[in-house]
Image: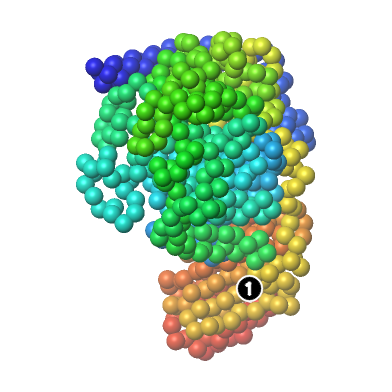
């Protein structure tokens, strides 16, 4: 019966969604914006946006940076995907960033980001992102807007419930989306899911000064699916809360079989207690293989290390670490309010929003107010931990953020709306339509102890008639709403790249002051750096030719190279000797089968080229740098293997020396 009910619910929800989209006319939707909307989002020429909006890129494996309130996109930051715009993952220096235990993996699915916090407030240091497909966590510097580190997650399959952070960024967590067999016996029948499949949650320590990541310990958990998570705050800061689904442990047709029960779980983890057990040696060191990739900003080069061990804790063997709380039907979002007292679980197939009380959770644990156990994990009684339920809020609740004024904002996928409600009284205060089928939403500072409020941004899954059509695939859509008053007001639609999932917004003042403008040339420790024209050279090392090259407005030194032979691998080590902000130089060679490289002022980057034919090949700057940008070019001559053409190079030589291979 429950399976039939679930199917009917999904069918009805789909009909409502389809009807809602079809019934929304462009004109009517446009009129939803207030008359002063344009004034509120207008940022005058030469002025700055109030907030940076750091947005996940979904299936493009990247992050994007937008300004709020303007909605202008400033930058795409490659994290888990190669990016030909700047050579990330193509240059010799950056290839190691995409190394994994499976080898070089040049793509991933980046669903969520998290911005570092101190005392529960944004501090503007780092952004973390998750790789959902090949489980990894990436760390981006918010001073350079570059990926500085990527660590692979062992014993995981589908890294969705991440990269959420503790109050002082002590840990980044990573929960597995798909439970799988772990340990020595992984070749088992899929039908033995209930017996052999396990989930894990990894606690990745963050060095407070450098941000350097390391896997501190993992929790071995029942074979359920972890969706999203949030750390506690204030009184609950030593705890983490995770949404869990598929408590049925289904392994096929999950849309029905993993939605059979009326309730799944919110998992509460006392990470401080788990840390104590780890320090006391209570865990078990397990052999694994995973990659840890780090960018050195002094050498501008990434290195990859393969790690071989991880510490695993089993909560069934330890006390006071993990508890489960029943949560209505397939919870997706799991969020904690700014005070840390209230934990909101969003059962996406539920008709209510449950709000749990941290104080009641502690009382229930102390009183052992259990409703049995699930795979050895205590299950707390629903009524004993519940603050209350938001009644009839909408269809398909997903995610909740907060404005710091006692209000919560929840996205509803099926009914395509944002609903504002009071955290304590649980009363619905306002609702606005979104266009269409909202997923995540973002309030500036919304997941922190100190939200700035002012706006809420909807990240919608379906665009339909909001923009000019671009064939079968349309742009993704974000919408900006004013929440400064009692009622939410639509201000702006703006397109986004990739498939945005989660995003966080942070005051521009916290980042701008630390923004790096150049790399000091005297601090360049790259082994192939060329710090001036007097150091330029071209060397042959067997079948390798290394070109030590400088770039400055508006020429390369050298810009004429001869003596390369077919079969050689040519390494162009290009140093941008500029020391002026916003003067990068690009470098490309005709016939290269990788990408350009983009070199920042004071930086060295390397492009590897293996010519596949003889001839003369242009090299040129790809990034506009001056009025003579077009003239910033040169030539490389490739001769047959075994040729007697000497290896020569130079810039400004009007009459290159003739050689015996040229017929007169």
Q: Name the side, left or right, on which 455 lies relative to 613.
A: right
Q: Quadrant of the N terminus?
A: top left
Task: Characterize the local packing of mark 1: few (<14), some (14-19) or many (20 or more) Cα atoms within 10 angstroms.
Answer: some
- Residue 618, how many percent across, how many down? 56, 67
Front-most of residues 535 and 630: 535
- Residue 316, how many percent across, how many down? 40, 42
Residue 263 in the image: above or below residue 635: above
Q: Name the side, left or right, on which 103 lies relative to 362.
A: left
Residue appearing at x 27%, y 28% in the figure: 257
Res 211 visible: yes
Dividing the picture into quarters, in which one does residue 296 lie? Answer: bottom right
Residue appearing at x 57%, y 62% in the figure: 302
Res 71 visible: no
Front-most of residues 457 and 477: 457
Dividing the picture into quarters, in which one does residue 538 lie? Answer: bottom right
Find numbered disc 1 in the image and state the secondary structure of the residue it sits on. Answer: loop
**How is the protein colored in the picture?**
rainbow
Residue holding disc 1:
528
Residue appearing at x 47%, y 63% in the figure: 306
- Residue 93, how many percent across, how many down? 56, 64
Q: Name the side, left or right, on which 615 lies relative to 141.
A: left
């Amino acid at each position: 019966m429950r399976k039939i009910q679930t199917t009917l619910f999904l069918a009805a929800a789909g009909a409502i969604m389809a009807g809602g989209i079809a019934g929304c006319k462009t004109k009517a939707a446009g009129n939803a914006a207030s008359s002063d909307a344009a004034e509120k989002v207008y940022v005058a020429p030469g002025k700055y946006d109030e907030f940076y909006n750091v947005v996940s890129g979904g299936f493009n494996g990247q992050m994007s940076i937008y300004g709020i309130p303007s909605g202008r996109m400033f930058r795409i930051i490659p994290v888990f995907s190669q990016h030909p715009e700047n050579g990330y993952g193509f240059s010799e220096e950056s290839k190691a960033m995409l190394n994994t235990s499976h080898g070089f993996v040049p793509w991933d699915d980046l669903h969520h980001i998290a911005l570092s916090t101190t005392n529960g407030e944004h501090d503007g240091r780092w952004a973390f992102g998750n790789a959902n497909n090949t489980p990894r966590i990436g760390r981006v510097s918010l001073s350079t807007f570059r990926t500085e580190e990527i660590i692979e997650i062992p014993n995981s399959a589908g890294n969705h419930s991440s990269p959420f952070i503790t109050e002082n960024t002590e840990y980044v967590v990573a929960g597995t989306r798909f439970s799988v067999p772990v340990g020595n016996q992984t070749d088992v029948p899929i039908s033995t899911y209930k017996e052999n499949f396990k989930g894990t949650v990894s606690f990745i320590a963050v060095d407070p000064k450098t941000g350097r990541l390391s896997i501190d310990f993992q929790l071995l958990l029942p074979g359920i699916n972890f969706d999203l998570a949030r750390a506690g705050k204030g009184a609950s800061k030593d705890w983490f809360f995770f949404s869990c689904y598929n408590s049925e442990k289904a392994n096929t047709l999950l849309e029905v079989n993993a939605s059979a029960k009326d309730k799944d779980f919110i998992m509460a983890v006392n990470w401080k207690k788990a840390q104590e057990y780890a320090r006391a040696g209570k865990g078990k060191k397990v052999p694994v293989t995973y990659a840890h990739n780090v960018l050195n900003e002094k050498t501008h080069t990434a290195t990859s290390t393969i790690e071989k061990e991880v510490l695993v804790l089993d909560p069934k063997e330890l006390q006071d670490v993990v508890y489960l709380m029943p949560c209505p039907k397939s919870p997706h979002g799991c969020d904690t309010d700014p005070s840390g007292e209230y934990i909101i679980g969003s059962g996406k197939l539920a008709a209510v929003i449950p709000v749990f009380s941290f104080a009641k959770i502690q009382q229930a644990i102390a009183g052992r107010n259990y409703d049995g156990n699930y795979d050895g994990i205590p299950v707390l009684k629903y009524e004993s931990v519940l603050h209350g339920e938001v009644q009839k809020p909408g269809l398909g609740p997903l995610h909740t953020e907060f404005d710091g004024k006692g209000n919560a904002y929840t996205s509803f996928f099926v009914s395509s709306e944002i609903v504002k409600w009071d955290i304590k009284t649980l009363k619905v205060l306002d609702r606005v339509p979104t266009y269409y089928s909202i997923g995540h939403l973002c309030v500036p500072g919304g997941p922190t102890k100190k939200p700035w409020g002012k706006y809420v941004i909807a990240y919608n899954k379906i665009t339909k008639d909001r923009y000019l059509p671009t064939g079968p695939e349309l742009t993704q859509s974000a919408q900006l709403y004013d929440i400064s008053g009692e009622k939410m007001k639509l201000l702006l639609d703006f397109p986004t790249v990739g498939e945005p999932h989660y995003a966080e917004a942070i005051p521009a003042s916290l980042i701008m002051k630390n923004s790096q403008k150049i790399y000091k040339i005297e601090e360049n420790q790259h082994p192939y750096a060329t710090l001036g024209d007097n150091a330029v050279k071209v060397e042959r090392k067997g079948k390798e030719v290394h070109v030590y090259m400088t770039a400055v407005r508006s020429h390369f030194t050298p810009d004429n190279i001869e003596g390369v032979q077919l079969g050689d691998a040519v390494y162009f080590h290009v140093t941008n000797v500029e020391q002026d902000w916003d003067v990068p130089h690009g470098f490309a060679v005709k016939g290269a089968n990788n990408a350009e490289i983009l070199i920042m002022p004071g930086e060295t980057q390397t492009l590897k080229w293996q010519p596949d034919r003889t001839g003369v090949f242009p090299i040129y700057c790809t990034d506009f740098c001056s009025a003579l940008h077009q003239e910033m070019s040169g030539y490389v001559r490739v001769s047959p293997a075994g040729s007697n053409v000497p290896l020569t190079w130079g810039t400004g030589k009007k009459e290159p020396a003739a050689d015996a291979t040229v017929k007169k």
